[in-house]
Image (cartoon, rainbow, N blue to C red):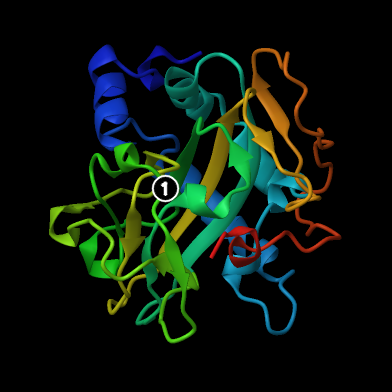
Amino acid sequence: MNPTHHLTPAQQKFYHDNGYLLGLPAIYTREEMAVINSELPQLLALLQPGETTKDIREWHETSTYLYEIAMNPKIHNLVEDILGPNFYCWASNFFIKDPRSMATVGWHQDSYYWPMAPHNSVTVWLAFDDVDEGNGGMKLLPGSHKGGVIKHRRSKETSSVLTLELEDGSDFNADHAVQFRLKAGECSLHDDRAIHGSQANPSDRRRAGLTIRYSGTNVKNDLSVNPNFKIYLCRGVDTFKHNPYGTPPTQRYSRPNFKPVSNEEAGKG
């Protein structure tokens, strides 16, 4: 394992206090990300009419292209220092904002969408492009993961790619949000209860990121809500046996033969 991709005690404390972490060593060099980006169109070509890039969810289950990223030991080093030695990967999805896209991501908490307990999950947001405030980079409210899960509302009159957002009047101040800035090949970490969102991308630059979700082996999914849920053990041992295991993929680019439960279907709103 590469010791440079382990967190210091100070970084671990910052994450647990604030619910996120930036300033991490790059997972991929710019040259490596150029190769990864060169393959992305072959994955996008599998989208069906009417689908968008946000429909690329859980394709790590069938595409080695994504599975290899999700199983990168450098990423696992970071995740282990947050979740402990026993954890699995269970989800991945793209958030791609093309140039001059007006799509936003409303303020929300990931944990509201996930039928999983207890709260012991971390999201890795891997930047495929340079990301900042100019092209719609994510913002997060430090410490918001400590306030519990807040009621969300359903809205169809929104530019957000999510139709469940924090209810109006929720007790949080967006002025305190931290702007995420990442170079291509870098990643951020955030807690499943941290309040976050992002603005539109009025720039001439694409803003693409792959989110990868990891949970401790003690976390159980409600299969009555998400019956296609599968896990892939990353490190350690699974003494709990709460969840079904998936089979690692063998094809470079392939889509699942099922439609994953959407965030809105899984949400409580």
Residue at horizontal 77 percent and vertical 45 percent from the top: 223
Asked if residue 226 is positioned above or below residue 242 in the image, the reply reads below
**Horizontal and vertical percent position of residue 60:** 70, 47
**Horizontal and vertical percent position of residue 75:** 49, 30
Query: In this rendering, would 178 be left or right of 112?
Result: left
The one of 255 and 18 positioned closer to us in this rendering? 18
The one of 145 and 10 positioned closer to us in this rendering? 145
Residue 34 visible, this orientation: no
Name which quarter of the figure residue 38 lies in: bottom right
Residue 175 visible, this orientation: yes
Asked if residue 2 is positioned above or below residue 251 in the image, the reply reads above
The one of 269 and 251 positioned closer to us in this rendering? 269
**Horizontal and vertical percent position of residue 198:** 32, 64
Residue at horizontal 60 percent and vertical 17 percent from the top: 86
Give the class, few, some or many, for how many residues have Cα within 10 Å of label 1's Cα (few <14, many ≥20).
Answer: some
The one of 143 and 9 positioned closer to us in this rendering? 143
Mark 1 residue type: Val
Q: Total label count? A: 1
Name which quarter of the figure residue 56 lies in: bottom right
Residue at horizontal 14 percent and vertical 53 percent from the top: 176
**Horizontal and vertical percent position of residue 192:** 45, 42
- Residue underneath mark 1: 149
* Residue lying furthest bottom: 157
Query: In this rendering, would 55 be left or right of 154?
Result: right
Q: Secondary structure at mark 1?
A: loop
Query: In this rendering, would 55 be left or right of 224?
Result: left
Name which quarter of the figure residue 16 lies in: top left
